[in-house]
Structures are given as C-alpha cells and as structure tokens.
Amino acid sequence: MQEFLTYLIKNIVKNPDDVTVEEILEGTTYNYQISVNQEDMGLVIGKEGRIIRSVRALAKSKAIKEGVMINVELLEPEGSTRGRKEEPEAEAAPVEEAPAEEAVVEEAPAEEAMPDEDLA
C-alpha cells in the first residue's frame, strides 16, 4: 500500500523527490502519513479537496480488497502557517445574563369568511 500511495502522489506533484509516505501500524489499522513539498500541497489537495479524497478512495478500495483497515493523512509541510492564526489570547469578559422578559403575544383579529358567490 505504501508503494501504491507513493506512486499516486509522485505522479500528481511537481517535486516527486520530496514525496514521503510513512506507514504506522496502530492496532489493526494502518495509518499512512503523506508529506509533500509546500508548493505541491494545492496540487495534492485539489479543488475543494477532490484529489486527496480520490486518493483516499483508491487506497481504501485496495485496502478492502486486501482485507485491512487504513487511514490516509496529508501532513502540512513544516513551517507552514496556512490555516493558522497566531493571535494573542484575549481574556474573556464576564458575561452577565439579562433578566428574562415575558413575551406578549397579541391575537390577530379573526378574518371574516367571504361568502361564495354563485356564478350561475
């Protein structure tokens, strides 16, 4: 499976020499951690995550055929700040609850039914 994932990813990226696929066995599940060059992350993820989802689907199909359970994870490159916001933590101000007010519901006047007019 590791060779299969390596083959797939290397044929997607522009820097195939930077592709590594690490296999970790946890219980009965094989975890595969894929690392690529930071420039290739967008190619591997694809538009709306379609490429990496397809890679996972292919790998899971092969795993079912082999009778094993797998998990495929794409690791962020080291030093990547994508998706992370480094902001100082602000102290939370105490929240005071406002007293509950009773809602006043007014009934709408009933509409009078219009009599049906005979057209004959």
Image: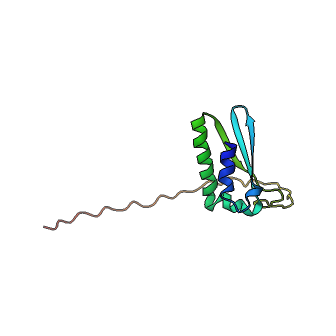
| Residue 36 against residue 57 in the figure, above or below | below
Q: Residue 59: name its quadrant.
A: top right
Question: Looking at the image, which residue is at 69% across and 35% down?
Answer: 29
| 69 relative to 90, above or below | above
Q: Which of 86 and 68 is in front in this view?
A: 68
Point 63% across, 57% down: residue: 49
Q: Quadrant of residue 81?
A: bottom right
Q: Quadrant of the N terminus?
A: top right
Say which residue appears at 72% left-offset and 61% top-offset: 40
The quadrant of the picture occupied by the C terminus is bottom left
- Viewer-proximal residue among 77 and 90: 77
Image color mode: rainbow
- The answer to whether 79 appears left or right of 120 in the picture is right
Residue shown at the point (53%, 57%) measured from the top left: 105
Number of residue marks: 0
Q: Residue 72 at x, y = what percent?
A: 68, 46
Residue found at the far bottom of this picture: 119
Outermost left residue:
120
* Residue 6, x across and y down, in percent: 69, 49
Residue 110 location, quadrant:
bottom left
